[in-house]
Amino acid sequence: MRTDIDPRNLIGRKAFDRDGNKIGTIDEVYLDDATGLPEWAAIRTGLFSRDAFVPLEPSELVDGTLRVPFDRALIKEAPDFGVGRHLSPEQELQLYHHYGLDVAPPPALPEHDLGRLAGSEES
């Protein structure tokens, strides 16, 4: 998803699944703690339904609506963490796994030969 979109402009927009079926209306947008970029949207799936979290990264804003590239049934089965609270790293990991998205660990630091200590002699 474009990172130049103001997350406040997403609230109240309609969301649709990959087949064009309406999921609901965006209630809240959750920002990544490290980057401050929009990462998750909580979508109200019906009048008396709960909110379902969807990842914003593979989603697109098209003609003023959010297009989520997952099936509506999968979205409705997403773990329910309630809205209005911070998502913990463990909860985010559960959501990534639910949607089958890779969560790669940070790359390992390359091994470098730092050379010898200045002033020391090689044997």
Image (tube, grey):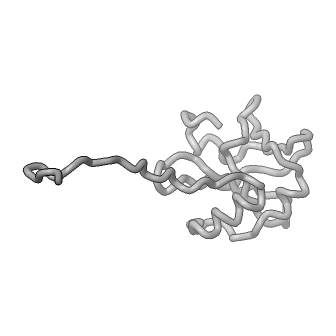
Q: Residue at x 67, y 46 (%)?
A: 56
Q: In this view, does 20 lie above or below 101?
A: above
Residue under the point 85% across and 45% down: 17
User: Relative to residue 45, is residue 63 depicted above or below?
Assistant: above
Q: In this view, does 70 lie to the left or right of 57?
A: right
**Front-most of residues 31 and 121:** 121
Residue 66, percent from left and from top: 75, 40
The picture places residue 30, in percent across and down from the top left corner, at 59, 55
9 left or right, relative to 25: left
- Residue placed most toward the observer, 83 or 113: 113
Can you tell which quarter of the image residue 50 is in? bottom right
Task: Please tell me which residue is depicted at 88% across the width and 52% down the height of the picture.
Answer: 72
* Quarter occupied by residue 4: top right
Measuring from the top left, give residue 44's x and y in whole percent.
Answer: 78, 58
* Residue placed furthest toward the front: 123
Q: Which quadrant of the figure has residue 99?
A: bottom right
Q: Is residue 5 left or right of residue 47?
A: left
Q: In which quarter of the image is the C terminus?
A: bottom left
Nearest to the observer: residue 43 or residue 99 = 99
| Percent x, y of residue 20 | 90, 39
Answer above or below: position of 94 versus 63: below
Position of the N terminus, as image quadrant, is top right
Name of the residue lying farthest toward the top: 63
